[in-house]
Every structure is written in C-alpha cells, then in structure tokens.
Amino acid sequence: MVLPESPGGEPLLMAARRFKPIYFLLEGLNSFAATYYSYYLYFYMKTRYGLDNKGNLLVGAFIGFIYMFSAVYGGKFAQKKGYFPALKLGFGIMFLSLCFGFWADKIGAGIVTQLAVIGIFHCFMCFTWPTLEALVSENESYRGMQTMIGIYNVVWALTGAIAYFVGGAMVERFGLSSLFWIPAIIHASQFCIVLYLQKQVGETAHQHAVPDASELEHRLSPVQKKSFLTMAWIANPAAYIAINTVVAVIPGVADKFHLSPTWAGVFCSLWFFSRVFTFVLLWLWPGWHYRFRWFVTSYALLIASFVIILIADNLRVVFGAQIVFGFALGLIYYSSLFYSMDAGSDKGSHGGLHEAAIGAGIFVGPAIGAASLQFFKKAESSTWGVALLLLIGLAWIIYLRIASRATQSNGRQKL
C-alpha cells in the first residue's frame, strides 16, 4: 500500500502517528476531569441543595438533553472548521465555566446558577470527544483503526475508572469545591497542549490514508455494515440510559449500604474496571467485529445486570452484577465507536453522531427514572421503568437484524 505524504515528504501515516500519543494524553486528561466533575456532581447536588434521587435524575436528564444536541454540532464544527479549533473552543469554555462554578460555589449561589454552569460545561465538552475520536482514527487503515480505537477505549475507560475510584476520597480530602478547580486546572493544561499541537501538526490531521485492497476483501456488504451501525446507535444510548440511571442514584445506593463517599467510589467503580478489561480483550481480539450473537448477548446482559445492581440487597450480588455490567457496556460502546469510524471519511461528523446517541441515553434514562418515581412513588419504580425501555430497545435490535437478513436474501435472489 502506498500512503499519501505529508507536506514535509514523510509518509502521512507515520507523520500522523507521531502525535497520537499526545492525542491519547489529551483523551486521558479529559476523561479524568469529566468523570470527576460529572459523576460526583450528584453528590454535590445532594449535599449543597438537598436533591434526592428524583432530583438528581432530573439533573442527569438535563445534562443528556444538552449533550444530545450539542454533540451533533460539535462533530460538524470539528469536521468543517478543523480539529484543533474545536478542541481549543471546547477546553477553553470548559475551563471558564468551571472557574465561574467555583466562584458561584464560594458565594453560595443558588441551584439555577450551578445548572447554568453544568449546561455550558457539557455543551462544550461536545467539541472535544468527537474531535479526539476523529484524531486517533484519521489516516488509519482498517487494521490500524482497530488498534487505535482499542487504545483509545482503554485510555478513556481506565482514566475514568481511576477518577471514580479515587474521586470519593478526593471529595473528602479537598472538599466539594474541588469538583471545580481540579478539572479546571486539567482543562487549562489541555488548552496549552493543543496550542503546541496546532503548531506542530498543521493540517495533516485532515488527510486520509488509502485503504489496502486486501483489507477491503474482508469488509461486509454496505447493507450489513449499515445494519450493524444502526443497531449500535440504538444499543449505545440504551447503555448510557443504564449508566446514567445508575450513577444518578449512586448516592442512594451508598446510603442503602451505609457507604461513605470514599467507599461508594471504591465499591461502585468496579464496573468501570470491568469495562476497561473488556476493552483490552476486544482490542486484542477483533473476531467480535460484526458478530450479531456477541452484540445481542451483551445487550441482554446489560438489562439483567442493571436491574440487579439497583434492586439487590446483598453487596456480593451487586459486586458480581457490576462485572457483567462492565462487560456489556464495553462491547456495546466499542461496537458503536468502531462502526461509526469504519463507516466513512467524515469521522468528525460520525463522532458527533456517536456522542449524540450517548447524549440521548443520558437524557432518556434519568428522565424515565424521574417520571417513574413521580407517578408510582416507589423507590424501585425508576429501575423497572428504565428496564422496560431497555427491553424495547432489545426488541428493536432483533427486528432490525431480521429485516437486514431479509433484505440481503432478497438481493441474492435477484442476482
């Protein structure tokens, strides 16, 4: 395979990969900062403003609503205006919003002010994730993309797991205000790194490598690929419906088992590390690509483990359910991102759609959970309301699979 060359004459793939460790550094910093702020935000809202499970679920729905629409625009902005301008805008506004949030916390501002900070922060976060996904995937062949996305998934999942694991202890050691100043410092450093990258990389990040013809022989038909992408874009928001329902009520789960914030972070981070382990396996073994049985099994396990985590009264049972939960989340997320990046050259836009699907899940899950608590008044009603929604998603995926196979069969008969 002959690769295009960068302006300096260096093969483009080599030129691009020279900077990818820095992209992964940016990604890891972003995951740590975003996880610490976004996930421990529910403890902050519970402590500062007295929000219960329903209140925190509504905050989660608000975040998802903002993220769902902002991600599409963020991906398109990165594709049209450039990856580095998108990153500078995202990191810069995230830094400023957290600084304002820190100031508002110090003067005892009301909940509306903090909700504005939350909305702005998550809106401009959408300029970072689609862009980082595109940067690590650009200029890669099919096999190279499997490697890059594998590393990408392990990096963000591991740093996010560490942030949640130590986050409770950080809150107890540095106080709730650290939710603002620690991520703000991280985002300021990211902004400086992007300034350096922009000078070094130039525009090579927007050029594309030519796929090897031998690799194309192993690709599926366009109908099959589109079908798997559609199923993944259904399953991934469903996974985030489950994640954000669980995360929003973790303070309540901690109370049920009499866990301090530190031990809640330690115990309830198990599924994070299970997801990391799953990402490593899927990175090293690409045989799961476009395999429906793996995909649908992981979705079914997602539903079962989600319910068990929220209704079980035994810590050991919750422990085991978290391991299964992390595996299911890992395969579903990996499928969505890989199929999105494999679908074409507009990786920024596809990354935005991938993140928008996540936003839809972040919105719908907590919204359904809060509505269930409002109308049925029972603590477990949010669990069953979300589980029903996940089952509808499973039925939809099975229907799409049947329809896709019927379409392929009809096409072969015409030939």
Image (cartoon, grey):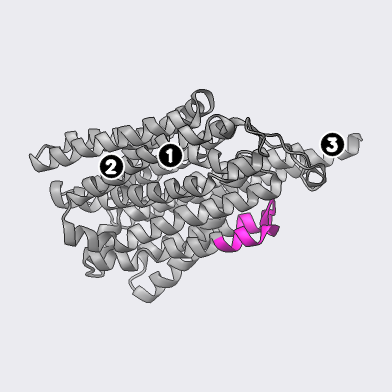
Q: Marks 1 and 3: which is nearer the front?
A: 1
| 144, 295: nearer the viewer | 144
343 is within the stretch colored magenta: no
Image-quadrant location for residue 111: top left
Q: Is residue 121 rendered to the left or right of residue 413? A: left
Residue receiving disc 3: 411
Mark 1 residue type = Gly
Against 43, is 217 above or below?
A: above
Q: Which of marks 2 and 3 is nearer the N terminus?
A: 2
Q: Is mark 3 on a helix, strand or loop?
A: helix
Mark 2 residue type = Val
Is the C terminus in the top left, top right, bottom left or bottom right quadrant?
Answer: top right
Mark 3 residue type = Gly
Residue receiving disc 1: 359
Q: Where's residue 321, x and y in %? A: 44, 68
Q: How far apart are marks 2 and 3 (CA)?
A: 47 Å
Q: Where's residue 50, x and y in %? A: 15, 49
Query: Callout 2: 10 Å neighbours few (<14), some, many (20+)?
Result: many
Q: Is residue 381 rendered to the left or right of residue 358? A: left
Residue receiving disc 2: 59
Number of numbered discs: 3
Q: How far apart are marks 2 and 1 (CA)?
A: 13 Å
Q: Earlier in the sequence, mark 2 or mark 1?
A: 2
Q: Main secondary structure of the magenta part?
A: helix
Q: Is residue 354 rendered to the left or right of residue 265? A: right
Q: Distance between the residues labelled 1 and 3?
A: 35 Å
Q: What stretch is highlighted in magenta?
A: 280-297
- The residue positioned 52% from the left and 62% from the top of the image is 327
| 100, 69: nearer the viewer | 100
Image-quadrant location for residue 68: top left
| 262, 53: nearer the viewer | 262
